[in-house]
Image (cartoon, rainbow, N blue to C red):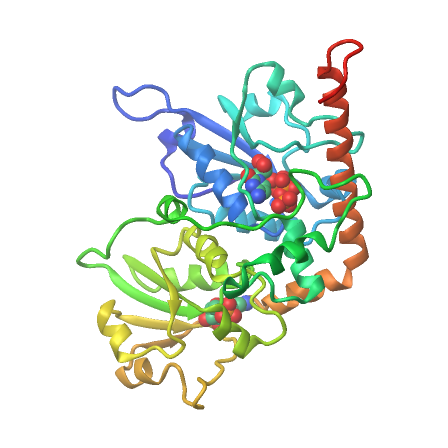
Amino acid sequence: MIRNGHGAASAAGLKGPGDQRIVRVWCDGCYDMVHYGHSNQLRQARAMGDYLIVGVHTDEEIAKHKGPPVFTQEERYKMVQAIKWVDEVVPAAPYVTTLETLDKHNCDFCVHGNDITLTVDGRDTYEEVKQAGRYRECKRTQGVSTTDLVGRMLLVTKAHHSSQMSSEYREYADSFGKCPGGQSPWTGVSQFLQTSQKIIQFASGKEPQPGETVIYVAGAFDLFHIGHVDFLQEVHKLAKRPYVIAGLHFDQEVNRYKGKNYPIMNLHERTLSVLACRYVSEVVIGAPYSVTAELLNHFKVDLVCHGKTEIVPDRDGSDPYQEPKRRGIFYQIDSGSDLTTDLIVQRIIKNRLEYEARNQKKEAKELAFLEATKQQEAPPGGEID
Ligand code: CTP
Ligand code: C5P
């Protein structure tokens, strides 16, 4: 069990002197290639109670029911733990959610997105808790899924970049992962539409307070991964009261220094992924590549950090950290992780056929389940639709 710095009272189910018992909420899932759709699910679930416990399945369980995961269980536990709405992570949670699991962790109910999760034999994994009335649903986030992200990596198109979100995207979305039976409403690909509401929901809404140390980091933060989490965790440790601002580069800028069809996630998407991280207080949505005096003065930055990854020069060949270095406020941080976005993409390409098969299998199972549900709901002898 991995706890996120909450008191013994909340873990035991007590709110505080004189208060009512706290509501403990359970979520579980694969949380493979954690994205802002997962974070949004956990945000909604946390808002339904006071304390959120997330059960994450093992590699073995996922391989059995769905196909091999992209990330190992240790990596997936860590990614979920870094999401700011999560109070506790339970490793090796069973794939099928039972009343026994909810009781064991003293949870009132579980929350899942309004899609369906099926076992290897096509059964709803939440059947038991649904029947017992201990199941709540939250809205699945449209426009993001592992299927889509894998597709972007494999197809090497730039149709997902924020400057090109157009009919080109529709063409791209229609061009892959098609299951012979059609497209599932859950696993299928759709375009993500960023709104100010979503940013408000994800943002801390807090300004730096007197006594807090303002730390600035910049980068692509593409496919937000453990390397980023490890880096931000180290950065966060630099001060007693840190206020970490992450400057996200524009898609075109990232493409200039990373090449191919990078970034895999566009600026809108990267914004939500980074805002969901517990070590980040604020995000600059489209930061200048070079950390200028103007930027440092504007945000009253105390420290600037970069990891051990390469620092690519700006367009004119200059060092992007020239100004913070001149001021003596630049620190290079060892995240201890060698993971990069490029390595993730390589992992996926290496296992391309397995992932494609896994996604098609998932979609086919969903379609079969939908068809069966429709038939059960149809009046005797009547037509469907
Ligand atoms: N989820 C969501 N919105 C998304 C993707 C997932 O709300 N766009 C929710 C699911 O409904 C579930 C939780 O995140 O409650 C964990 O999902 P997970 O088991 O990891 O699997 P998938 O739904 O398969 O996610 P993906 O297709 O992106 O792998
Ligand atoms: O590569 P990207 O621009 O997304 O990196 C953002 C920040 O995270 C950079 O400072 C980079 O050095 C750091 N990082 C790290 N360890 C990793 C991956 C990234 O310290 N494994």
The residue at 28%/73% (across/down) is: 295
| Quarter of the image with the C terminus in it | top right
- Give how far across and how far down residue 122 sits, in percent: 77, 29
- Give how far across and how far down residue 138 sits, in percent: 51, 31
Q: How many marks?
A: 0
Q: Quadrant of ligand 1?
A: top right
Q: Where 298 sits versus 8, above or below?
A: below
Q: Quadrant of residue 216?
A: bottom left
- Give how far across and how far down residue 27 sits, in percent: 54, 33
In-image side of 300 versus 168 (left or right): left
The residue at 76%/40% (across/down) is: 182
Q: Quadrant of residue 379?
A: top right
Q: Quadrant of residue 44?
A: top left
Q: Where 58 sits versus 173, above or below?
A: above
- Outermost residue, top side: 380
Query: 126 and 199: which one is in front?
Result: 199
In-image side of 288 versus 337 (left or right): left
The residue at 38%/49% (across/down) is: 199
